[in-house]
Image: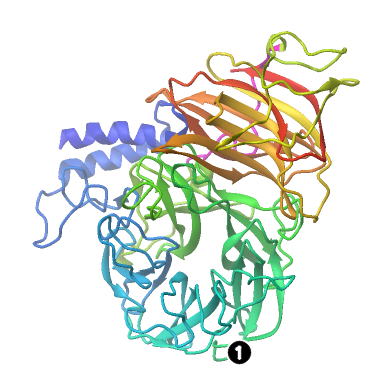
Amino acid sequence: RWCIVVKTWFTVIRTEEEHMGTVRRPGPRARRTLAALAIAALTAGGTQAPGAAAEPGQGADRDGRRGAGTYVNPVSKGFADTFADPAVVRGEDGHWYAFGTTDPLRSGEGAMHSIPVARSTDLVDWTYVGDALAGDGPAFADTGAAYWAPDITRHDGRYWLYFTVTETTVTGERGDSAIGVATAPTPAGPWTVHDEPVVAPRPADGGSGFKWTFDPAHVVDTDGRRHLYYGSYHGGIWVTELSADGTRAVGEPAMVATDNRFEGAYAVRRGGWWYLFASSGDCCAGPTTGYSVFAGRSRSVRGPFTDREGVPLTASRTGGTVVLTPNGNRWVGTGHNSVVTDLAGQDWMVYHAIDRERPYLDEPYGVNRRPMLIDRLDWEDGWPVVRGGLGASERRQKAPVTDPRHARAADRERDGGHRDRRGHRPGRLDPARGDEFEGDRLGPGWSWVRPADVRLDGGRLVWPTQDADLHKESNTASVLLREAPRGDYTVETRLTIDLGEDTVRNYQQAGLVAYADDDRYLRLSHVAIWNTRQTEFGKERPYADRVAYGSMTVGPPARTTWLRLRHTTDARTGEHRFRAYTSRDGARWIAGGTWTMPADAKVRIGLVSHGGSGATAQFHHFRVHRG
């Protein structure tokens, strides 16, 4: 038992800042936790109920005994290797039920599960109970159609399962996705499938193909009217009123989030606001998946939704407050969420993620392995954030309260989260490492990978965007670099670039780069992606026999945008960690996600301006702060 105490000591003091690569002395919260766990360790019995297979990290301590209120992600490990797009509801029987997207559940299984369903008594230990659509799907589903992104709610004494149908018989054309619905008296079924689309396939603007009618989310407004959110990158996210029986879209839909940026809508009502959660980035880029969750809020279920900065989610320079984004630990691709509330009133985010060292289900570039995770969802100043800004957990955490005998007011004590999630204070300026771009030539210390035609003009480095790129095999763009300092540092630039708004411009961009070589780099840039303008934090790295690229998004850009990369080193692995920050005024900063680079990578820092000709980047400074 004393061994448990010792293990617990090291676990707790490392947990709260695990992603920052630091170990601090335990504070008051940690010491209280240690005391409680020490007593539990010394008084706990060593028996286990027959047939209760305790799996370390899944509601059990590492020595196999049942844990008292802790868990380790992923919570789906006991029944599945992958369980994407999870949605959770509490049944009238007191159990919790999770519904996932169509996929095999295990490596090597091969068989697809049509909306797999799992059951739990505690939101931590889950058991597979079957497939919701194991029999025939809706009559309008084409042969071979998959059922994605289920949404589960209880309304009028029944359970409502809305889902994406990837191919239909409605139009006779490929790619004509739609939303279907099934109902049941219990979350375990039996399910009665409605044989008409709730939202029918929608032709794309211009008459070529179809908008992506994906990712439904059902809500009931305060006046009792039912609404459904749906949509994805191609076409944006929309909300429509539903008929009273929940089977048909009625009235005029409203766009609530722009196309080419968001998908995976989920909405909750809190404190007089409707909060719209939406995921952004590539869901399925293996080890470089930057999928992240953002939020906006509105007084109306139909929007408009704006972020903490007041920027609409429908703007071309798109808004969205960061809720959950990769933090540099094992988990990348942290997205497509639902929200549940435990019996103590604490909210929890349920979502999927990808282990960057085991990103695929069977072999590289097959099905992305996206297990189900759960973490505490906090509300700070009226905005949701996972674990106070710490993001996805990979070590033991305090579990939800799911036993009615132990229901109590939620423990609101917080760990403080990211100390720098709203912008950190950089260390001392190192003038020798930077450049204010004064005079008529670059300062000492710069070098080129493939020289470019640039000029200095009144304290600005003027660099037209090149008709070239750094993307997988397209390594034709110029890179302006200098040596990075040792230890912790922050590199910053102030960038003015006019990429217009709303018009399609792919993929002009400029910004900062952390560069090892053409296939190993990180890039934080203001970029035009179709009709949107985003701050994209991308990563490229070799994986298996290919080069992988993926990205995450930070804050909304402006015509002039400040960009920062904060470098630290993981104390355990030696990995380089770079966290992205953006600002529209140089004063208020938005913290984004963290990418890593190998410990042995010789990383240089610098600037890029490429992705297509037609725009001009103006860099006002390049500054390096030590510490």
Q: Is residue 547 above or below residue 261?
A: above
Q: Quadrant of residue 573?
A: top left
Instruction: Residue type at mark 1: give it.
Output: Ser
- The colour mode here is rainbow
Name above or below for residue 273 compared with residue 504. Answer: below
- Secondary structure mostly seen in magenta is loop
Q: Is residue 553 magenta?
A: no
Q: Which residue is tagged 1?
A: 243
Q: Nearer the viewer, residue 29 or 603?
A: 603
Q: Residues within 10 Å of mark 1 (few under 14, many from 20)?
A: some
Quadrant (top left, top right, bottom left, bottom right) of the N terminus: top left
323 is higher (above) or lower (below) than 595: below
Looking at the image, can residue 592 be seen? yes
Q: What residue do we see at 39% from left, 37% from top? A: 15
Residue 272 seen in the figure: no
Measured as percent of width and height from the top left, residue 187 is found at 36, 78
> Is residue 425 in the magenta section?
yes
Where disc 1 sits, the SS reads loop
Magenta-tinted stretch: 415-430
